[in-house]
C-alpha cells in the first residue's frame, strides 16, 4: 500500500477516535431514537467514512479491505450501534462495486454520495419471478440496518436458474422508490441501528441489477471489469463478517476503559479499595487478554485476504471457512470478555442507561449475527476440514 493511502487510513482512524467521544455522548439518545442520530450520520458523511470502500471511479476512496473494521472498533468505544451502521453501510459500496456497470451508474451516476442498505433475511413469503428483461419482486425483508438514511437496498433472494429447473442465490439492487421502510426495530441490543423491515408490494428489477452469488466466490466479478482494485475480486461472503465484528471490539474496549477508570477510585459499601483486590486485578487482566487476543487473531487473515486479492489468488474452500471460523471465534472471545467484565459493575450495572450494560448487550448482539455465530462457523469449518462438502451455498 502506498504512503498516501496509509496516511489517508491513519487520518480516518484518527477522526473516528475523535468522534467516538461525541457518539458516546449521544449513545443513550441513539437508543431512545432506535436509529443513529441525524447529527451522527452527518458526521460520518463529512468524515468520508461511507466512501472508504466505494469504487474510485465514483469518488470513493477504494481503501484496503478491513479499514471498516478499524473505524468501527474506534467508533464502537462510544456507541456500538453507530459503529455497526457505519461499518455495514460503508461495506455495501464495496458490494455494489461487484455489480454490473449499469447498476453502479444507476446508484452513483448522478448521486455519488448515495448509500445502500441490505437485508439477507426474508420475512414470510416472497416472490421472485422471471420476466422479460429482469425479475418481478415482492415480499418483506428484515434487519435492514440504517435503511432510513439509504437510497437503495440489496436483497438476498433466490432466482430461477436459466435452465428453469431449480433456483440459485443472488443479490438484487432495488431503489428506495420501490420499497417502504417500516419502523419495527425494537431490540435489546444494537438498539440504535434502525434495523427496520422493508416491504416491496411490487418491483421490477432489471437484469443489470442482479448479482449472482456464484459470481462472488473469489476472482473476477461483473463489477471488476470497471473497478480494477483487488477488493472487487474478494470472496464476498467468506470475508463479509469483517464488516460486523468491529463494533464488538469497540464496545468491549470502551466498557473496559469505563470500568478501569471507575475502579481507580471506586470503593465498595464496606470501604474496601476494589483496585487492591487480586480477584479484580485478575479479572481486568483476563478481559484485556481476551479482547486483544481476539483482535490479534484477525490480523493475519486480514493480511492474507488482501495479499491474495492483490496477487489474483482465489482461496480454497478450507481457507474461506477458516476466515469465518476465526471471525466467529473473535466475536465469541469478545462475548466472554464482557461476561467477565460485567460483574465488576455490581448493582450499578443494572441501570438501563449504564454504558457498560449497553456494551454488554451490544457485544452479545453482534455475536448473534449469522455470519459470526460460533456454532455455525465451527461446524462448517470442521466439516470441510474433515473432507466433507461445504454446506454453505454462499461460500
Image (cartoon, grey):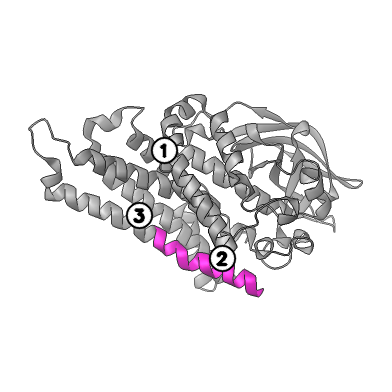
Is residue 94 shown left or right of residue 127? left
Q: Where in the figure is residue 121, as x and y percent of width and height?
A: 62, 42
Element carrying mark 2: helix
Query: Mark 1 Cα within 10 Å, few/some/many (few <14, many 20+)?
Result: some
* Sequence-earlier tag: 2 or 1: 2
Element carrying mark 3: helix
Q: Report the mark closest to the observer, 3 or 2.
A: 2
Give residue 117's quadrant in the image. Answer: top right
> Is 113 above or below relative to 303?
above
Given residues 40 and 233, the one toward you in this image is 40
The secondary structure that most of the magenta stretch takes on is helix
Is residue 67 shown left or right of residue 336? right
The answer to whether the residue labelled 3 contacts the one labelled 2, judged by CB atoms less than 8 Å apart, is no
Label annotation for residue 3? 2
Estimate the spatial distance between the alpha carbons at disc 2 and disc 1, rounded to whole Å.
28 Å
Label annotation for residue 21? 1
Where are the magenta residues, as a range? Answer: 295-315
Residue at which label 3 appears: 291
Give residue 362's quadrant in the image. Answer: top left
Amino acid at each position: 500500500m502506498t504512503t498516501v493511502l496509509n496516511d489517508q487510513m491513519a487520518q480516518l482512524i484518527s477522526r473516528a477516535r475523535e468522534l467516538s467521544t461525541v457518539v458516546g455522548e449521544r449513545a443513550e439518545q441513539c437508543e431512545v431514537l432506535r436509529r443513529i442520530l441525524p447529527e451522527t450520520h452527518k458526521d460520518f458523511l463529512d468524515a468520508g467514512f461511507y466512501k472508504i470502500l466505494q469504487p474510485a471511479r465514483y469518488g470513493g476512496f477504494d481503501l484496503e479491505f478491513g479499514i471498516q473494521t478499524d473505524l468501527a472498533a474506534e467508533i464502537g468505544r462510544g456507541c456500538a450501534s453507530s459503529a455497526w451502521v457505519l461499518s455495514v453501510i460503508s461495506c455495501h459500496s464495496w458490494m455494489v462495486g461487484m455489480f454490473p456497470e449499469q447498476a453502479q451508474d444507476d446508484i452513483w451516476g448522478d448521486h455519488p454520495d448515495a448509500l445502500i442498505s441490505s437485508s439477507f433475511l426474508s420475512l414470510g413469503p416472497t416472490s421472485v419471478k422471471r420476466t422479460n428483461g429482469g425479475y418481478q419482486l415482492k415480499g418483506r425483508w428484515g434487519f435492514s440496518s440504517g435503511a432510513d438514511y439509504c437510497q437503495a437496498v440489496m436483497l438476498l433472494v433466490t432466482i430461477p436458474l436459466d435452465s428453469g429447473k431449480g433456483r440459485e442465490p443472488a443479490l438484487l439492487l432495488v431503489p428506495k422508490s420501490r420499497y417502504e421502510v417500516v419502523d419495527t426495530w425494537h431490540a435489546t441490543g444494537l438498539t440504535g441501528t434502525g434495523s427496520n423491515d422493508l416491504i416491496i408490494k411490487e418491483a421490477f428489477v432489471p437484469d443489470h441489477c442482479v448479482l449472482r452469488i456464484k459470481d462472488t466466490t473469489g476472482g473476477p466479478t461483473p463489477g471488476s471489469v470497471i473497478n480494477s482494485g483487488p477488493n472487487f475480486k474478494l470472496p464476498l461472503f467468506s470475508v463479509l463478517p469483517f464488516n460486523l465484528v468491529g463494533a464488538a471490539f469497540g464496545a468491549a474496549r470502551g466498557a473496559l476503559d469505563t470500568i478501569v477508570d471507575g475502579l481507580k477510585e471506586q470503593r465498595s459499601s464496606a470501604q474496601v479499595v476494589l483496585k487492591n483486590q487480586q480477584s479484580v486485578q485478575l479479572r481486568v487482566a483476563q478481559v484485556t487478554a481476551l479482547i486483544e487476543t481476539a483482535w490479534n487473531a484477525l490480523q493475519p487473515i486480514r493480511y492474507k485476504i488482501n495479499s491474495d486479492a492483490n496477487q489474483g489468488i482465489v482461496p480454497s474452500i478450507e481457507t474461506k471457512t477458516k476466515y469465518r471460523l476465526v471471525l466467529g471465534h473473535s466475536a465469541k472471545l469478545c462475548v466472554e470478555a464482557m461476561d467477565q467484565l460485567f460483574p465488576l459493575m455490581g448493582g450499578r450495572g443494572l441501570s438501563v442507561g449504564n454504558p457498560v450494560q449497553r456494551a454488554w448487550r451490544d457485544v452479545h448482539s453482534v455475536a448473534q449475527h449469522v455470519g459470526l455465530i460460533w456454532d455455525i462457523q465451527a461446524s462448517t469449518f470442521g466439516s470441510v476440514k474433515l473432507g466433507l462438502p461445504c454446506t454453505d451455498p454462499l461460500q
